[in-house]
Amino acid sequence: MTAPQRDAEIRRRWHATEEIKGAVPPISQEEVDARAKAALEFLVRSGTLDTLVELAATIKMLHDIVTDEIVEEIGRAVRLLGTALDTLTRSQHLMALVNAIADPEIERGMKKRVGISDILGLLRDEDTRRGIYYLLLIARAVGKEVRNLAEP
């Protein structure tokens, strides 16, 4: 919108306001004061005024402490969270883990008294070995990421 267009819009709104004011019957200053006093008394008695003051103070405090740097940091965090959620919802590995945890055999195994022979028996199972290998691959990948964090 150009400056002349903006000025024309302001004049149009001003004239519309004047037309509306002309169409409304005049109210005495005493009536305006009485209505304002009644409204203010309601706001005070209901606690709404206190709430509004507290809200305004909170907004002022947030305005004072929130810097451009904080806004940028929050934006980066939100973008990272979005990327992480997208990755998690598309991950077949995560779904495999969720399905494994939901396996009824796990619930039964948690109630059982477990001995060394039970553990050794599971190690002979191909699926157990595959699961341990999978967890070790994840541990190795996490280790690489941690090493990359530690390197300058």
Image (spheres, rainbow, N blue to C red):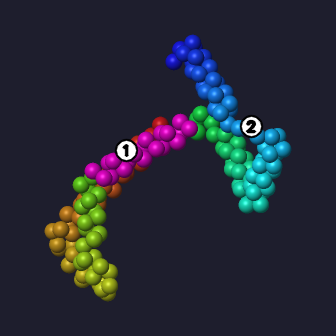
**Predominant SS of the magenta segment:** helix
Region of the chain picked out in magenta, as a range: 71-90
Quarter location, residue 42: bottom right
Front: mark 1 or 2: 2
Q: Secondary structure at mark 1?
A: helix
In the shown orientation, is residue 69 left or right of residue 141?
right
Q: Earlier in the sequence, mark 1 or mark 2?
A: 2
Three-letter code, disc 2: Pro
Three-letter code, disc 1: Thr
Quarter location, residue 11: top right
Label 1 with label 2: CB-CB less than 8 Å = no
Q: Secondary structure at mark 2?
A: loop
- Front position in the image: 63 or 22: 22
User: How many numbered circles are shown?
Assistant: 2
Q: Residues within 10 Å of mark 1 (few under 14, many from 20)?
A: few
- Residue 106 belongs to the span the image colors magenta: no
Answer whether residue 65 is visible to the viewer in this image: no
Q: Furthest-left residue in view? A: 126
The residue located at (58%, 35%) in the rendering is: 69
Residue at label 1? 83
The residue located at (71%, 46%) in the rendering is: 56
Residue at label 2? 26
Location of residue 116 in the rendering, given as x and y in whole percent from the top left corner: 28, 82
- Front position in the image: 82 or 133: 82
Say if 2 sits above or below 69 in the image.
Answer: above
